[in-house]
Structure formats: structure tokens, C-alpha cells
Image (cartoon, rainbow, N blue to C red):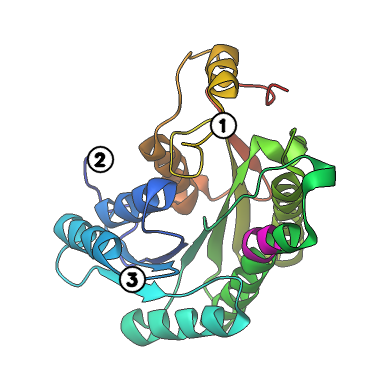
Amino acid sequence: MTGSTELRDKVVLVTGGSRGIGRAIVLAAADAGARVAFCARSLGPATDEVVAEADRLGGPGSALAVRADVASETDVEALFDAVIDRFDQVDIVVNNAGINRDALLVQTSTVDFDAVIATNLTGAFLVCRRAVQEFLAQGDGGRIVSISSMSQAGATSQAAYAASKGGLLGLTRTIAKEYGHKGVLANVVTVGYVETDLTRDIDATLRRSLVAATPLRRTGRPEEIAAVVRFLASARADYINGAAVRATGGLEEVPT
């Protein structure tokens, strides 16, 4: 990161911002001059570290961590209330919070399926709904960037995760159609194989297959995904709406 002012005077809210891609997005936003808030299901040393680093990049008071579970409507409403109370506005929202429960279809329990949908899709819906309400009230439009996955096209042992990410793409494009004329832009970043806590336990054979199938022959870095989000949040992306921007290293599909 080099530091800039492309997001100066903007307030960015990132869900699931304590680690991995979310942490990288928080720091990229602070580095670009934004005030940034993020949520995690629990606060502690990890969230404190992100706040401290964001404050170092953006200046004291640049960052706010809020305990919230996006699967809870009450928590989402309280999250937005806290951000607006602290920063007076919200301009850019990044849906990054996500969980997975990998299993073949017939081995996937209803409890696990519902948990994944509740966080990855219903949670995103709750965040988007409140975000659009705020954007319309503020009158200046806004940006929604959602982190998706190549699994949105279907992937072995990911019935719940794939369904949630496919639904996220439909949700995003609906928002783009309904509110684009109000200056609300909604886009998805389709992510390939990035080394994070969520992917660290992938089977070694599948890991090798993913890297081999990626033309760059390596995993992605969270900072590389954050750079795409930073671009979509900026004025340079003013004519991008309803798009699924691929950040996959050239990987075309998830190996089976």
C-alpha cells in the first residue's frame, strides 16, 4: 500500500474485518484516506490489532471495531447505528463476512445449510438493505461491494456455500438494477484460491489441483483482493455496476 486520498471523506464499513481478506480491505481503505468501521463476531486482540494498524495508516480515530453477527438483524441494525453515531454517515459497504460447512449434499445437515445461508446470504441481505436505506437518506448514492467465490457456479462438497454465493450474485445484480439510477452501485468480486483462515484446511490434493489449474501457479493474497475492492469503491469505477469482477489468477473453474 502506498497511501492516497482517493477515499478521503468516505466512510467504509466492512463485515468480517478482523482477519484475512476482510482485514486487508479495512487496511486498504484506511490507506486510501477513508474512515473505516468493521465488525466481527467477537472483539479482542485480533480486532484491536486491526484498529491500531488502520489508525497508523489513516490517522488516530480512523477505525472502529464493532461486535456484530451479520446473521442477526438486531446486530446489523446496531452495527449501522454505531457507525453513523461515530462517523455520521456510511458511503461504502463491503460484504465480506462468510462461513463454510463443506460436505457432500447428502451429508449436509439442515442446521449447517441454514447456518451458511444465514451468514453468507441473509446477512448480506440485511447489510445491503440497511446500506441502501442510508444511501437514499443521505442523497449521495453509495457503493456496495460483495466478496463472492468461484463456488457460485457450483463446487463439489459446497452445496451450502455455493448456494449462498450464487444467491449473493443475484442479490447484487438486483440492487444494481433497482437503485443504480439513485447512484447506488453494487458489484461482486469473484475470488479464486486465496490463502486465508477459511481456506487453510482445504484438502492437500485439492490445494495442489487449485494451484496447478491457476495460470499464475500460486495462491492469491488478501491484499490483492483488497486492491480490487479499493478500485471498485473509488471514483475510478463510477461506471461499473452489477458486475462480477474476477480476481482468480486466471483460474476458470474449481477442480472436482
The residue that mark 1 highlights is 192
Instruction: Say if residue 8 shows up in the picture.
Output: yes
Vertical side of 192 occupied by 44: above or below: below
> In the image, is residue 130 part of the stretch drawn in magenta?
no
Vertical side of 179 occupied by 145: above or below: above
> Of residues 222 and 197, which is closer to you in this image?
197
- Is disc 2 surrounded by few (<14), some (14 to 19) or many (20+) residues within 10 Å? few
Whole-angstrom CA distance, mark 1 to mark 2, is 21 Å
Vertical side of 132 occupied by 3: above or below: above
Amino acid bearing label 3: Leu
- Mark toward the start of the polypeptide (1 vs 2): 2
Amino acid bearing label 1: Gly
The residue that mark 2 highlights is 1
> Of residues 180 and 70, which is closer to you in this image?
70
Say the numbered circle drawn on residue 43. 3
What's drawn in magenta, residue-wise? 115-120
- Element type where label 3 sits in the image: loop
User: In front: mark 2 or mark 3?
Assistant: 3
